[in-house]
Image: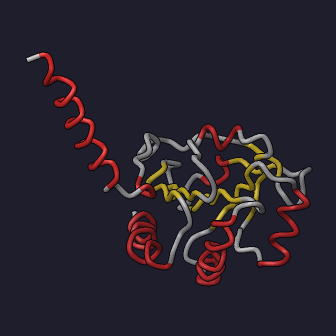
């Protein structure tokens, strides 16, 4: 009987591996969903003498997009954010993550700036509070300052239309 245990352990491990490979890595459940967004006060990218606080956004539905000039996926996502910004549906606030200010500003000059305002998280501490796995990541935050959705990876036209915009409309109606 003891000699079958390795086989049973192998089968159980194979089942877990098979299930895990079928999951979408962009839908990693976040423990922050339906919890208050971590508060922060950070310098602004375009004027580091000015501060931006997440508390300033109480009473508004908003997106917090974590990005960096060195991020390849951020370049793929950027046209989607530019189009969303032109629609003026929801304010998009940027969090320039572990980046140099001059690199972030140069990147925005070349590709356009979809953000209402951008803060810099040079040391990544706010990113840690938000559970950032990597950039880009986007958080939809409601009027009470509660995270209602987290997009891991680039926002696409498809997930914008299917998930994010309907949720924004629902939260703005409340």
* Location of residue 113 (image quadrant): bottom right
Between 121 and 25, the one lying in front of the other is 25
Q: Residue furthest left?
A: 1
Residue 57 x %, y %: 62, 54
The C terminus appears in which quarter of the rendering? bottom left
Q: Residue at x 40, y 66 (%)?
A: 167
Residue 165 x %, y %: 45, 73
Residue 148 x %, y %: 44, 54
Between 16 and 47, the one lying in front of the other is 16
Residue 56 x %, y %: 67, 51
Q: Residue at x 50, y 42 (%)?
A: 36
Question: Is 154 left or right of 126, judged from the image as shown?
Answer: left
Q: Is residue 90 above or below residue 118?
A: below
Between 143 and 91, the one lying in front of the other is 91
Q: Residue at x 54, y 61 (%)?
A: 153
The mark tally for this picture is 0
* Location of residue 23 (image quadrant): bottom left
Q: Residue at x 88, y 69 (%)?
A: 106
Between 133 and 170, the one lying in front of the other is 133
Q: Residue furthest top?
A: 2
Question: Is 41 left or right of 139, judged from the image as shown?
Answer: right
The N terminus appears in which quarter of the rendering? top left
Instruction: Identify the colour scheme used.
Output: secondary structure
Q: Is residue 67 above or below residue 38?
A: below
């Amino acid at each position: 009987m003891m000699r079958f245990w390795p086989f049973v352990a192998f089968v159980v491990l194979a089942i877990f591996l098979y299930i895990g490979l079928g999951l979408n890595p962009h839908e990693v459940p976040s423990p922050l969903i339906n919890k208050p967004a971590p508060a922060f006060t950070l310098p602004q990218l375009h004027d580091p003498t000015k501060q931006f606080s997440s508390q300033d956004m109480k009473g508004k539905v908003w997106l917090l997009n974590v990005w960096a000039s060195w991020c390849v996926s951020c370049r793929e996502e950027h046209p989607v954010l530019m189009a969303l910004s032109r629609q003026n549906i929801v304010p998009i606030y940027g969090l320039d993550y572990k980046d140099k200010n001059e690199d972030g500003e140069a990147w925005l000059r070349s590709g356009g700036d979809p953000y209402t305002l951008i803060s810099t998280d040079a040391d990544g501490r706010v990113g840690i509070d938000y559970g950032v796995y990597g950039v880009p990541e986007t958080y939809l935050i409601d009027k009470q300052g509660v995270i209602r959705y987290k997009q891991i990876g680039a926002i696409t036209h498809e997930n914008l239309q299917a998930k994010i915009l309907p949720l924004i409309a629902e939260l703005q109606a409340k």
